[in-house]
Image: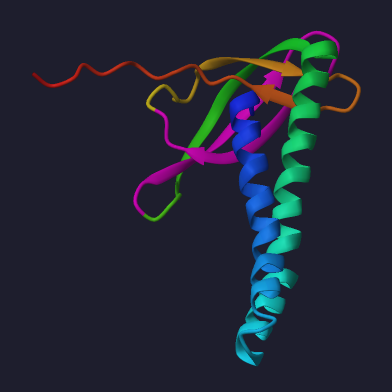
Amino acid sequence: MVGPVGALLRHLVGAATALLGPALLAGSVTAGTALLIVGAGFTLVMTPLGIGVIVRTRRERADNRSLDRSGSAATAEVIALTTIPWDGEVDGVRLRVRISGPGFRPFEAAWGRSAHSGLRVGRLLPATVDPVDGRFRVRIPAGPRRRAPR
């Protein structure tokens, strides 16, 4: 779930990414052909990526607001955890859950995420489901706090 601060940061990154190409293109007008080609290339690639980040963030925020308004409380049971490559330095997990609750048929879903010490097969997690279109959100509670070394 993207909160207001996360949404602001994503919008800033999206805007910076979208404007990088046009800025390079504008700066390269007097710099020569090679830089002009680089600026055009960045514009063609980075501008759609930046716009995509902004659109995806807005859609995710709208989905979360919709779930807050009309979602039904549900339970997600972790039925499988598989270790997957995540960011090159640490492993992630492929999380498979069975989601059930009042007003909709139980269903299963899976997604990849960073590893979390609180995830284990059989754990029940709070979830919210839109019974009309099946959108859902699973809340994964914060892991146990570790004491700082003395």
- Tell which of 34 and 45 is nearer to you: 34
Q: Residue furthest front?
A: 30
- Tell which of 39 and 92 is nearer to you: 39
Q: Residue furthest right?
A: 132
Residue 117 location in percent, x, y? 37, 26
- Of the 4 image quadrants, the one containing the C terminus is top left
Residue 26: tell me if it is visible. Answer: yes
Q: Which residue lies furthest to the left in this view?
A: 150
Colour scheme shown: rainbow
Which quarter of the figure has residue 98?
top right
Residue name at image x 63 percent, y 53 percent: 16
Horizontal arrangement in the rendering, residue 150 relative to residue 4 (left or right) = left
Residue name at image x 77 percent, y 14 percent: 68
Horizontal arrangement in the rendering, residue 58 relative to residue 3 (left or right) = right
Residue 97 location in percent, x, y? 61, 28
Residue name at image x 72 percent, y 70 percent: 43
Q: How many labels does the image show?
A: 0
Residue name at image x 42 percent, y 30 percent: 116
Residue 3: tell me if it is visible. Answer: no
- Tell which of 90 and 51 is nearer to you: 51
Residue 33 location in percent, x, y? 66, 91
Horizontal arrangement in the rendering, residue 8 relative to residue 144 (left or right) = right
Q: Dominant secondary structure of the magenta stretch?
A: strand
Q: Does the magenta stretch include residue 96?
A: yes
Which quarter of the figure has residue 41?
bottom right
Horizontal arrangement in the rendering, residue 140 relative to residue 150 (left or right) = right
Q: Does the magenta stretch include residue 119?
A: no
The magenta region covers 89-116
Q: Which residue lies furthest to the bottom in this view?
A: 33
- Of the 4 image quadrants, the one containing the N terminus is top right
Vertical side of 103 occupied by 92: above or below: below
Vertical side of 138 occupied by 93: above or below: below
